[in-house]
Structures are given as C-alpha cells and as structure tokens.
Amino acid sequence: MIQVKKLNKWFGKLHVLKDVDISVKEKEVVVIIGASGSGKSTLLRCINFLERAQKGQIFIEGKEVKPKGKDLHLIRQDVGMVFQHFNLFPHKTVLQNVIEGPTQVKKMPMSQAKELGHELLKKVGLEDKANSYPSMISGGQKQRVAIARALAMQPKVLLFDEPTSALDPELVGEVLVVMDDLAKEGMTMVVVTHEMWFAKEAADRVIYMDAGRIIEEGTPEKIFSKPENERTQAFLKQIL
Amino acid sequence: MIDIPWDFTVIPSYFPRFYGAAWLTLQITVLGILLGLVLGLITALMRISRSKIIQGPALFYIWIIRGTPLLLQLFIIYFGLVEFVDIPRLTSAVIGLGVHNGAYMAEIFRGAIQSIDRGQKEAAYSLGMTKTKAMRRIILPQAFKRSVPPLGNQFIIALKDSSLASAVSVRELLLTARQIGSSTMMMLEMFVVVGVYYLLMTSVLTVLVGKLEKRLKVSDRRS
C-alpha cells in the first residue's frame, strides 16, 4: 500500500528524518511512537506531501510519487489525514465539513453526499450535530467530525497525526473508540500517538522512532513486553 | 466676504441644493470601492504567489500608489492621460480612487489571507483539493470575514477621499460647496452643510459595516 524508502528530511540544518524505511500493507494498522521531536509527525506529513522530503522515495500502491508532480492532489484523495488540531472549516457546519471533499473534489451529487455525510456522522456518533458549527462542539466531537470528513473521501489509507494530543483527558476515549472501530473494520491506518492503550489494542505493528530514525519495530506484544533496543526500553519505562 | 457676518440659520434651506452632488459623491465612492476591491483581491493573490514574476508587478503597484499622494494620482490620470485618451472627469475620478484604494485593500486582503491558520490549507489539501480550490473554498471565505473591519475603515477613508475629485472638476459635494459658497458669499456655511453630509454618510457606512461584522461572526472562532 505505502512504501517509504530511505527518506531524508532537513528543516534548515536540522536533520529530522534519517534514512527512514517503512511499508504499510493493506488493512494494516501501524502505530508510530516516540518522544516529541523524534520525527514521527514529520514522517506522516511527508507521506501526504504536506512536507517535502529532500531525499528518498515514496510509493503508493506500487507507484512512485514525485513530490514535484502536478497530480499531488490526486494522490491525496486516497490518503486521508486527521490532524492534531482538527482543522475543521469554521465557516461550514459539521455536515458541510464532511461533504466538502466528496462534493468539491469528487463531484458527488449533493443528495448522495448528504446521505453519505449523515451516514458517517452516525458512525462517529454525531448525527445530531450535523447542523452545528465547529465552534459549538467539544474537542472530542470536533475530532470525530474530522475523522468523518476524512472518511468521506473513501481513502485507501488514513493518517492520524497525534489525534488526541490536543484533547482534554476525558475526551480522549471517545476518539480512540472510533479509531479502534475503524481498525477493526479493516481500514488501513498509520497512527502517530502517545496513547499506548490504542497501540496495544489496535496496532498490528508498532514502530518506535528516536532522533529521526526507526529504532525498533514489531508486534505490540514484542515492543511492549520485550523491547530489544535499550532506547525503546527507556522510552517505554518513562511513559508506561 | 469679509464684511458679511456668518449666518448659520440659512443652512437648513441649502441642504436640498446638494442632493445631486451628494449622489455624485456616493457614486464615485461606491464605484471606486468596487474597483478597489477587485484590484485589491487580484493584487493580494499575486502578492502571495511564490513566483517572483507574479509578485513583482503587485509589489510595484503597491509601492507606487502608497508612496504618492492621491491628489497627484488624480492629476496624473486627469491631466496626464488625457493627452492619450479622452477620459471623462467622473471616470477619471473613479479610476483614481479605485486604483488608489486597490493598493490598500490588497494589503488588507493579504494580511487576512495570511492570518488564516496553516492547518486550514493543509486540511483542504488532505482532502485532495488543488491550491486554487483550497483558496476559493476554504481560505478566501474566512479571509473575507476577517477583512471586514479594516475594509470598513478603508471605505470611510475612500468616501472622504472622494472629495479630492473636486480638484479635477467633478461637481461632487466639496466642489459644489465652493461654487455655491462663492456665488452666495456664504463659504463657511456651505462647508458646514457638506460637512454634515459627509458625517451622515460616514455614520451610515459605519453602522452598515458594524451590522455586517456582527452577522458574519456567527460561525467564527477557531476550530
């Protein structure tokens, strides 16, 4: 599904990604963990070309994506993204947020898009908020709308960039439950998170990153119960 | 004139004589603002382009217009360009005011566009939107909303600046006041009359902009 080969990214002189290789198979849920500044969000943003890596290759469904290509927006239609700060469109209602993609990008007829929108809102438990504006709902609800918005494009893979980091603790659960459901339905997902519960529960594979490198990867059981690398051990000791 | 005492009691009776002039002032202002909005938006979009070739003309335009007086710009259009093309007075006043305001509005729009959170653009891109679509559907609607207060301010400036059209013989409020004033020897009285006109018009404009601002606020706040 996604293959990243020898990706290198610099912000000025700062080398944030160093020869990163990852691959994500269809229906796989990959969770990336690591301390702040380890490059995990940047990696995610590079996959979606919100950041341009200076070196390396990214393949989506076997085809190499050129960062200069004019059809980046076509690639992004298949790669959904959920952001830390939700980034809902404040001038649109919840339903309008969800159907913006299908109607504007996919040219789906309005009635069909609305049907899809309501269906997705129901799925994330926010049917009754369809006509509210983002400013009127809680953070957890916003993030669930953002997930519905990303799903509305029927992407082949969903990227989550610390989806619960900006939420009050009591709102984290409702978002993780939605994500867990998606994982169980067979959605291909790459999730950057600090929520170890989610990693243990939903991940097929956990990747630990530090200082721009992938240090260790494996099944959640392996990473959480017997990590091999001492940096992984130290990190997990800190947060568990 | 020196010997004639001021007589403010005549003021009310002279109000109707300025209807036509007030209408002209309003026309110059509204048309000038509309032209300014169009030029401003185009210039703002050019200004934020990454291409230096597109940015260049926008920067040049803003530099020239903001760096020279409006009165001079009006003279250049009215007396200068008349050598090449025959521009009617009213049109030259509208062009002058529009081109002048366009430069200021460009900076208002640019500021508003750049104040929109980067995440908005990223969210639009992540849905597969092109740059143009993201700008049109997501960034500009929010930026317009944020431009309303500074634009309102600029509209008021434009309304008052329309008085400079008197210098290119457009018979708007100020020129009419001078003409009636000198023929009736009641200069100051007529200036008070047009002063009241301007004050009325700017007040109405302020209220309208305030109402618009309030209506647009409904869905605002960051999300």
Image: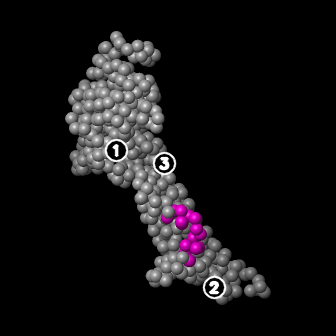
* Residue indicated by mark 2: B180
| Amino acid type assigned to the residue bearing label 1 in the image | Tyr
Q: Nearer the viewer, residue A89 or B205?
A: A89
Image position, residue B37 (x, y; %): 46, 64
SS state under label 2? helix
Q: Nearer the viewer, residue B211 or B143?
A: B143
Give the farthest residue toward the bottom.
B183
The residue positioned 46% from the left and 52% from the top of the image is B113
- Mark 3 and mark 2: Cα distance apart in space: 48 Å
Q: Is residue A87 magenta?
A: no
Tell me the quarter of the image containing the C terminus of chain A.
top left
SS state under label 3? helix
Q: Earlier in the sequence, mark 3 or mark 2?
A: 3
* Residue indicated by mark 1: B125
Using residue A170 as the reference point, say whether residue B151 is left or right of it.
right
Image position, residue B12 (x, y; %): 64, 79
- Tell me which secondary structure the magenta stretch mostly adopts: helix
Q: Nearer the viewer, mark 3 or mark 2?
A: 3
* Placement of B83 over or under B197, stated as above or below: below
